Image (spheres, rainbow, N blue to C red):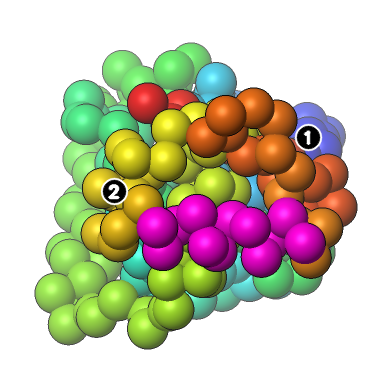
Amino acid sequence: MKRFYDKDLVETYLKQTKYESIMSGLQEYLFVAQYEKGEFVTMPLQQEHFFQIIVQGSVNIYFIRDDGSVYSLANGREDYLLGEMELFPHQLSNVYAESNDDVICLALSIEASKNVLLENCKFLQLICESLTQKMESVTTLDAAPASLKQRVLTYMKYKCSLGELRGLQQAAFHLNCSTRQLQRILNQYEVDGIVIKTGKGTYKLTFSTLFHQNSNTSTCN
């Protein structure tokens, strides 16, 4: 992510959103965030949390369960809001927003402006409306169909620290398959050069498989 704090640039992009009247009072906290295609706009365990409005480009928003199932939540475009839940204490989620192309957002640091945001009635009304719409959408979703082979790859990318799976039995439990099935898939991935065996019951994704992932979300127990 690249950040730009130029006030004129912020004002220019603010005028392009339908939320100008609401966000103008918060303009001093805003900056421009630019993302390249394939870069995560939001993800679990990120060090800084932002409220963001998409000004240009689009993001793919999805949820990954512990068994590697992927739920496509939305395709956010201009004026789509990100980071509303970060205003309130909540359990860590597994929701990712990944840029489909070059994306420009208006952003503000939640930590630096949280008290101001929580005292802004119009801003809170905007948050409530956005979260209500998202909740209505989520209730109609089903998991995207995926083979066990694909779920193993997703599990290693998003659920294992640095793409390294440690312990076949516990991984098989999370993936809802047998240890034998998992071993067979990992053996084939090793032959295909997708993973390398680093120890007994331990396999790691190769760099070429992981290169577009800037970081991982959690640790495989």
Q: Amino acid at mark 2?
A: His
Magenta stretch: residue 147 in it?
Answer: no
Q: Nearer the viewer, residue 86 or 54?
A: 86
Distance CA(mark 2)–CA(mark 1): 38 Å
Q: Nearer the viewer, residue 117 or 139?
A: 139
Q: Secondary structure at mark 2?
A: helix
Question: Residue 131 location in percent, x, y?
Answer: 23, 58
The stretch of residues the image draws in magenta is 180-191
Q: Which residue is mark 2?
A: 174
Q: Secondary structure at mark 1?
A: strand
Q: Quadrant of residue 115?
A: top left
Q: Which residue is mark 1?
A: 3
Q: Earlier in the sequence, mark 2 or mark 1?
A: 1
Q: Nearer the viewer, residue 81 or 212?
A: 212
Question: Residue 113 location in percent, x, y?
Answer: 43, 21
Residue pictured at 48% horizontal, 16% vertical:
112
State which quarter of the image contains the C terminus: top left
